[in-house]
Amino acid sequence: MIFKLDLQAVKPVPAWFTATQALALALLLALAFALAGCSDGEALLSPTERARSALAIGDAVQAEVILRDQLATGVSKNELAALLGEAELQQGQIAEARTWLGNGEFSDDTRAHGFHMLGRLEMEEGNLPAAGAAFDKALAENRKNAGLWVDIARLRYRGGEQIMAVDASIHAVGLDPNNPRALQFRAQLVRDSEGMAAALPWFERALEKNPDNTDLLYDYAATLGELGRVRDMLVVIRRIAEINPAERRIYFLQSVIAARAEKFALARSLLLRSDKAAQALPAAMLLSGIIDMENRNYASAAQTLERLAATQPDNRRIRQMLARALSLSGSDKELVYRFAEIAARPEASPYLITLVGRSYEALDEREKAAHYLDLAAKPRSARLVAIHTNRQMGNGAVDIAPSGRDALDMVRAGISSQNTDLPLRFAERFLERFPGSADALSLAGDAALAAGQNRTAINRYKAASTIRQPWAITKKLYAALIASDRESSALAVLARYFIGDPGNIEAAGMLARIAIGNEDWQGAAVFLDHAIRNGGYRDPILLSLSAEVALQRGDIELALHDAEGAYTIQPLSREATRALAMAYRATGENEGWALELEEKLKQMPQG
């Protein structure tokens, strides 16, 4: 079921929504009350209650005006400090919020709320221990505040106590099943651990009771978009615009839709209309780089992707996109300077290796070009490969690293050096320090997997997945299950992930390979078609597989189309060369070309 926003646009209609006339009448009544200035019910509210109501709907400016008027009439500062601090926080005025909240002087009636807001303030400034202390004081006054438990959950999540954060989020929903912040945070956690589809009922449950909450609607729209439900997403976006015409974040979501439809000029226009905060997000920077490349603004794309790569040095996708932008802009010297060493590592992708080889070719360094192009053509192992690190791990005592980054580097160093004992001990010590952290659990899984302790690795990855299940963890859990001869369980993990994140083309490709292994040509075709339509149209391996599956199904025209596409992208690929040779053979009209490709295939490195 989708949350009902427009009777004509989305079906079925949820039971709680009765008729368009009822909504129209409610809007007219609300407008009438607004024009009248004050309803009978509003007249019965005290100024403080009116300020609380304004804060509840996000109108912090109105709340501040009411509260300052109260101060002017002689109401004690301690009576109003908690609410004034909240009003300043909602407006992003951190320094002003501290003037009201920092000294912790609140009336008995507002003490719980005051320390709650102080905790939010400390968390906003990154002072997590001080935030925890403030939340503890708030809990001492009131342990049954769902909103407080949501903030405690967020604090625990940021502090690496993610299992405890999940528990706190569940407790918050139990205290108030209709609290929009509690339901929204629970939806976000479910989205991280169980996938997009599993999160939808949580968003819809929250929206049934809070249909005009734009933060909820925005999160819901983004989740629908990730699931490929574009029409439903647009319905929600229109609803956000109706509620708050000044909400500019929606243009980012619309820009994503336009880019997926390959309307890149429109995508750029929409992205520029979004607010500065949205444009500064990593996802928006990545989108900007993609749009620039598709619009052939390669130098601009390289600048944006370079800034993004600096903040996410381990993100291979961003690294490859930056290399592509440099290649297309003709910046071959910079490309080889930045990526030649990376491309020589075992974990480097054939695509990155090829880009480096072609840049050396453009610089007329034939010997280096040949080395990299030969390396790109070599068959790839399906095994997981340790990621390179410059860190060295000695044989001394295992020390607890001061940061997660140090822990990651130390474990990688041990795995790369094939010294599996030290990474195991180090990862387990790090996990003892942060037992509720998904990152610590995943790292312990990596160390166990490298040491061949598959059962331990599976348990660690599964525990991490209950908190957050990115694609990287799913792949490693899949590998550990396969290594333990648990093929059915591995397939179930992969299928469950794909259902939750159908836009992941690598997952679709893996499912296609499994189908091919079972000679399920129809199933393989479905997965490959999905992967290619959702961004895999430049992947020569996917196109090659699609061509071979098409031949098995007797679709020679599609086989030739995809095989030629794959070969054009990567003429040094064994898969692309074999697929095109087979396609030419199947046509019965290109025997000479087929013979030439088959001869080339004989000269290529064997798997």
Image (cartoon, helix red, strand yellow):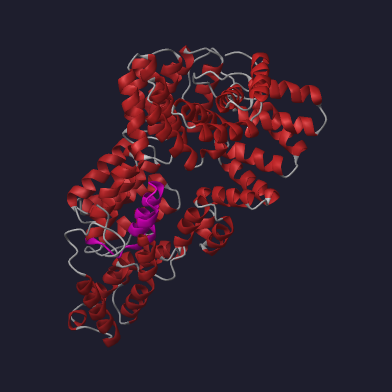
Residue at (48, 61) in percent of width and height? 251
Answer with left or right where residue 380 lies relative to residue 458: right
Residue 176 visible to the viewer: yes
For residue 306, what is the image quadrant?
top right
Q: Main secondary structure of the magenta part?
A: helix
Closer to us: 221 or 219: 221
Residue at (22, 75) in percent of width and height? 26
213 part of magenta stretch: yes
Image spot of residue 227 (x, y percent): 37, 46
35 part of magenta stretch: no
- Give the magenta part as a residue range: 209-234
Closer to us: 514 or 16: 514
Residue at (31, 56) in percent of width and height? 115
Closer to us: 86 or 408: 408
Answer with left or right where residue 12 lies relative to residue 345: left
Image spot of residue 223 (x, y percent): 37, 50
In the rendered view, would you say 455 is above or below 465?
above
